[in-house]
Image (cartoon, helix red, strand yellow):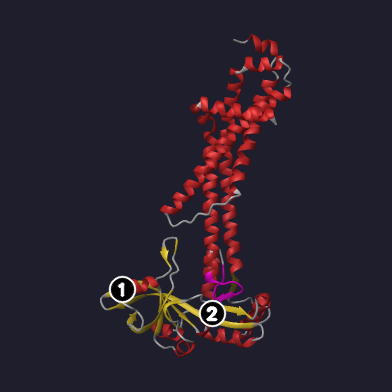
Amino acid sequence: MTQILDAVRLALASIWVNKIRSLMMVLGNIVAVTSIIAVVSLLQGMNSYVADVIMSDVGAGTFKIDKVGFVTDEDEQNRRWRMNPNVTTLDARAIERFNPEVIDAVMAEVGSGANLAYADNTLENTRVRGVSASYEEFSGYAAALGRLPSRNEIERGHPVALIGSDTADKLFEGRSPIDRVFKINGMHFRVVGVNEKKGSVFGNSQDEFAVVPLAAFQRMFGSRRSLELSVKPSSPDQLEQAMDEARIAMRVQRHLRPRDPDDFGMYTSDTLMGFWKSFSQGAFAILIGVVSLSLVVGGVVIMNIMLLVVSERTREIGLRKALGAKKRDIVWQVLTESTTLSMVGGLIGTLFGFGLAMLISALTPIPASIEPWSIPLSLGMTAVVGMFFGLYPAIRAASLDPIEALRKE
């Protein structure tokens, strides 16, 4: 242990004395580790953020039914959109009535962009969402001002609306929005509540919207738009059974024969999360490949400079061997120095990587998350690089003849 600590102190002293050479020696490691730490932090931040968005949209323990489903192939998506019939309120009622013991609630919804107007203020292409009476079971909305539209108002299609906080600020400019009447595509609606602030997704505000009864939405935009159904099982443990029951109900409602394929789509939050995880893992694998090249280049530089160090310290090595140092002692000395130098580069790269991730997160909508496990990962990678590429210089130093080494001027 004393020998290793002495070698570490010697390596750190060498770094301090030969600052420029040491910097060039570990520059490849710094660049590689900075890249991997920054990308890992950004990917982990994205994973958490996407998970929150998916859970808020789809919901835990629920599933969705729509016209197409979750399809990654664009041609297949277009084919399904042309061939499959629209999802309607009749489908929602069929699912709701099929097995009430397993299926607790079904919400139908549809959305579109619309112009909102109040006095001289107009908000163009604002998201408007029409929902059915069960929306409170799924939506996650909570009124910061006023209240949510009641079940009776939703069922009767009353012209009432819940609006986002940014919509309220821009449309009413500091005035209390509650009970004020505004227009959506020329139709009058009364504000009954302002939703609590949700924030933004990649710089896009999630607080510019209006929620209205589905019947009122269909009076504005027509009833030919396909709906999206959210289905909630009676308990989370019955999710698979509820999906089977909903599939049967849809097939019966649409008079599909046993051999006919489903003409609708069905997915859960796990489906979307699985796709995102496969994408992020693929991106991480590509990153590892690119970073590995930088680490190899950095390792070659370490090897060359350690060969130079061995050449400069030939007399010192010869003297140590003459005084009784064994080959393994010389090998461990050189390996410890090369590993220490490499890990110093890894430590600097870790600090730079965290700083770069935080800077990107501060200047862009991309979130970042500092992962503690990335620190030992980066130091471990650079330690392996230092040991592997320091092995040849170490063996060469240990193979020096002490007499010939002492003769060297």
Circle 2 sits in a helix, a strand or a loop, which is it?
loop
Q: Is residue 323 above or below residue 112?
A: above
Residue 337: x, y in percent?
A: 62, 29
Magenta span dominant secondary structure: loop
Q: Left or right: 342 with respect to 330?
A: left
Question: Does residue 84 lie above or below 399 as drawn?
Answer: below
Q: Is residue 330 left or right of residue 283?
A: right
Q: Residue at x 60, y 58 (%)?
A: 278
- Binning the other alpha carbons within 10 Å of mark 1 as few (below 14), some (14 to 19) or many (20 upward) gives few
Which residue range is magenta in the image? 56-70
**Mark 2 or 1, nearer chain start:** 2
Quadrant hosting residue 294: top right
Tell me residue 264's x, y (percent): 58, 76
- State whether residue 289 appears in this view: yes
Q: Could you tell me residue 50's position as x and y percent? A: 53, 62
Disc 2: which residue: 85
Between 257 and 134, the residue placed more toward the observer is 134
Residue drawn at 61 percent across, 49 percent down: 373
What amino acid is labelled 2 in the image? Pro
User: Dot 2, how many residues are within 10 Å of its Cα: few (below 14), some (14-19), or many (20+)?
Assistant: some
Q: Is residue 61 shown in magenta?
A: yes
Position above or below: 369 against 144: above
Viewer-closest of 17 and 206: 17
Identify the amino acid type marked 1.
Gly
Left/right of residue 395 with respect to residue 200 in the rendered view:
right
Label 1: which secondary element: loop
The residue lying at 57 percent from left, 55 percent from top is 280
Total numbered labels placed on residues in the image: 2
Q: Which mark is residue 174?
A: 1
